[in-house]
Amino acid sequence: MEDSSSSGQTTGGYQNGNWGCAGNSQNNQNTQNGGAYQSGNSWTSREQSTQNGPVTGQRKYGNYTYYQPQQDQNQPQDHRKPGGTGKKVIVTLGLAVLFGVVAGGIIIGSSMIANKEIKNEQKTEYQLPTTELPQQENAAGDSNSAAGSGSDATEEVSAGTTGEYTVAQVAKSCMPSVVSITNASVKTVQDFFGGVQQYPSESSGSGIIVGQNDSEILVATNNHVVADADTITVAFDDDAVYEAQVKGTDSDNDLAVVAVKISDMNEDTLKSIKVVSIGNSDELEIGEQVVAIGNALGYGQSVTSGWISAVDREVTDEDGKTTGKLIQTDAAINPGNSGGALLNMQGELIGINSAKAAATEVEGMGYAIPVSVAQPILDELMNRETRYKADEDHAGYIGVTCLNVDSTSAQTYGIPLGAFVDSVEEGGPAQTAGIQKGDVIVKFDGMTVSGSSDLVGKLEYYQAGETVEVVISRAQNGEYQEQTVSVTLGKKSEMKQADPQQGK
């Protein structure tokens, strides 16, 4: 950016004339070269002018004669020097300005210190609490503090000796930890005549507040909830809506973390939300009661309850991909519940709702990712740098065109899931890094890659010139083996290959 500021030179002084000042007659004897200007542009000495001047009050200016009244000899004479009053005014003004500068500096300094203290107080004030259920007493009259104490600590609980709470109590305590997520994007489709059309698309999901850092509220959700998003918004418990950014994703485990800036949020929202308490999904037993909270069908948060139907379930999704081990429950989980919370009866998070077996002959079969599986992945994603989509002038590209590896090809040919490299741009970033046709890109900057569109979506957050570690799987002696290469991204506006986003 060019600097539009300019500097100037200041000139001063009177060059073509002289400044003259005629003193009173008492000082004229000490003046050697002084003069007074008369009409006719001639100079006469002060001494001569004084000798020729009348003493009765007569005064001459050029050819003009005027009379000045004589002062009363008894009247006190003013012996102040010419300009004395002006000097006092200037000195007074100078002192006033100096006082103002000093006072202003003190005020500004005090204000800066006060603002710093206020900011420090705000950081402390906005440390989110975790979800807490009211204390209860067991049959022996002892206080059960497993859930901690909170604002509802005085509420009576009739849970007996089980240490469990009602569905209403769990919902009331944990609702501030669950959010609604809206994914807005623009879809590109091919029409009947072979042309390409774009249309806006919007989908809904859920999320769970799992932590915060100095500047962000961190929300866990499913990867498919935020995939291919152009804009992500999060609605909190007080119905306030804020824009969010994807912090990290793991498509293999269908997990993601999005971040909302604390500076964007108002005080009422910050006071209304909480971080969810984490439970232990490894200790679940079939038949335990659970509570599910989520943004069902995009209508807002709703609560359902059911039982643990099974644990360690593996499910094949609609793309033919087999999931990891999931929790099965008969608590109603519908579209929009994805990314929401599955809670035990102590109000602790035990699973992240992920999928539902959808068929006319199926009823009451929902699935959630166990928190014991999700937590280490979420911890890694929460510590990643928050990225923003690069603008067109700085967008990066890798220099490959890819195909998706479906489950059938993976099982038939033993190809790992990822983005199959169909072509490599000659002289492009990928070829320079050693990537070849036939390789499968399985990770990009530490994040798993599920396919071609997933890779394209991740690249949108990286700028030209960045060096990124890419994990590829290459067939060697009939077996695929992984290796890591470093790719310095090129400038998308200069790429020679066809834009892979056209086939997105």
Image (tube, helix red, strand yellow):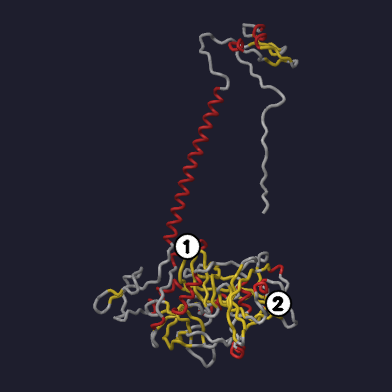
- Could you tell me residue 83's position as x and y percent? 57, 22
Q: Quadrant of the N terminus?
A: bottom right
For residue 214, the mark is 1
Name above or below for residue 259 compared with residue 504.
Answer: above
Name above or below for residue 475 compared with residue 230.
Answer: below
410 on left or right of 124: right
Amino acid on which the number 1 mark rests in the picture = Asp
Q: Quadrant of the C terminus?
A: bottom right
Q: Residue at x 40, y 70 (%)?
A: 130
Q: Residues within 10 Å of mark 2 (few under 14, many from 20)?
A: few
Name above or below for residue 429 compared with residue 214.
Answer: below
Q: Residues within 10 Å of mark 1 (few under 14, many from 20)?
A: few
Amino acid on which the number 2 mark rests in the picture = Gln
Q: Which residue is mark 2?
A: 197
* Mark 2 or mark 1: whose residue is earlier in sequence: 2
Q: Residue at x 73, y 83 (%)?
A: 192
2 vs 1, front mark: 1
Q: CA distance from mark 2 to mark 1?
A: 42 Å
User: Tags 2 and 1 in contact by the CB under 8 Å rule?
Assistant: no
